[in-house]
Amino acid sequence: MSGTTQLKEPETFATDQVVEFGVGIRRDAGRALADLGAERAIVLSTPNQSDMAMELAADLGGRAAGVFTKATMHTPVDVTEEAFAHARSVGADSVVSVGGGSTIGLGKALALRSDIAQVVIPTTYAGSEATPILGQTAGGVKTTLTDAKVLPEVILYDPELVVSLPRGMTVTSSLNAMAHAAEALYARERSAKSTGLAVEGLRAFVSGLPAVMADLSDLAAREATLRGAWACGTVLGQVGMALHHKLCHTLGGTFDLPHAQTHAIILPHAIHYNAAAVPKLLAPVSELLGGKAPGLALWDFAKGLDAPVALRDLGMPEEGIARAIEIALQKPYWNPREITAEGLQALLQDAWAGNAPGTTEIR
Ligand code: NAD
């Protein structure tokens, strides 16, 4: 898959989303649909989460028009078209998306085509539910667009549904969310509001994640981290991202690497690289994590949670580093520090091998 992207200039959307948190709140999906005037919802999930989708459809009773359980990572257009045909054939006027970014992406893709109402029940921390951003894949090429139509109307955060997120995915998905907030701290369009939200999101994970790791079924800690996911996702929708996100996009697209794990590995390295240019803006990361330079603090945090640290462990070949640098430099984008081939070489060498950030010197 090529890593081509067409990111629009970031726009700030007024978020008039309805956002609710609570144990068992998923059972309010029918009420949320009724509030939206929706009568026939199609429930979306990945194949892995089809049981959850079936359970929700049963709960919705007459408001469930169908179930579609083929949501796939990176929102392939052929899957969207199949879901769209299914939604039309059952006369759906709404979707209930239960799952992570892949399922939510499918609901957004349907909304883009039909402006169908969306009630979203997130089961990871990726944050897609809080953004007007949609990434789609066609012919092996992923493109990203921003459109107010794809922002879900209602988010129901139910900690009970995140309990099943396995330990490894809990960590990588959290670091994925924290990456949105970390890059928001130095975003060009940042404001006091976006910075406040980013710090709030980071704090929720720094304080909540150790409790989740101690007991994956701790509902209070799961809810605290879901609040972090909301803050991090919301800020992702409000300001533009830079080196970290673009590099993950390139790596994910070029080497078909898993989304959350790639974010988890790159985060300390990208933040270390940019901290050299904007140390003050990244100071909240050090303050929240205990004093070290921001990239190293994130590295210690991730390692302490047994996060993956090496791209080679995800299956990226070492010779892929040169290819990634070439693609990453093809389309220049704004970043607080100039992005050079030498800088990327050192960063990617460390991320590939699993070294601490800054181990390889920039030549
Ligand atoms: P995902 O939705 O791809 O889920 C990964 C796997 O975990 C799936 O098999 C899923 O069924 C399973 N899973 C999810 N929640 C689970 C749970 N609670 N228990 C057990 N299994 C569970 O993973 P993701 O990281 O949430 O999403 C990645 C996708 O989201 C990527 O395509 C990424 O580009 C997109 N994304 C988009 C935005 C945006 O704003 N547009 C933001 C973040 C991520």
Image (spheres, rainbow, N blue to C red):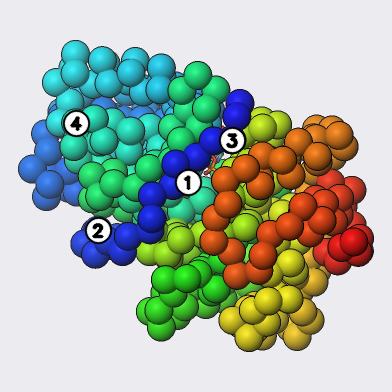
* Amino acid type at mark 4: Ser
Residue with the mark numbered 4: 114
Q: Residue at x 66, y 68 (%)?
A: 337
Answer yes or no: disc 3 within 8 Å of ligand 1: no
Q: Are marks 3 and 4 in contact (CB under 8 Å)?
A: no
- Residues packed near mark 4 inside 10 Å, few (<14), some (14 to 19) or many (20 plus): some
**Distance between mark 2 and mark 4 Cα atoms:** 18 Å
Left or right, residue 277 beside residue 156: right
**Distance between mark 3 and mark 2 Cα atoms:** 31 Å
Secondary structure of the residue carrying numbered label 1: loop
Report the mark closest to the observer, 2 or 4.
Answer: 4
Answer yes or no: disc 4 within 8 Å of ligand 1: no
Secondary structure of the residue carrying numbered label 3: loop
Which residue is more in the foreground, 8 or 123?
8
Q: Earlier in the sequence, mark 2 or mark 1?
A: 2
Q: Position of residue 243 (x, y in %)?
A: 62, 58
The quadrant of the image that shows the C terminus is: bottom right
Residue 3's disc number: 3
**Distance between mark 1 and mark 3 Cα atoms:** 26 Å
Report the mark closest to the observer, 1 or 4.
Answer: 4
Secondary structure of the residue carrying numbered label 4: helix
Residue with the mark numbered 2: 17
* Amino acid type at mark 2: Gln
Left or right, residue 15 beside residue 355: left
Instruction: Give above or below for 210 relative to 283.
Output: above
- Residues packed near mark 3 inside 10 Å, few (<14), some (14 to 19) or many (20 plus): many
Corner quadrant of residue 295: bottom right
Q: Residue at x 17, y 26 (%)?
A: 92
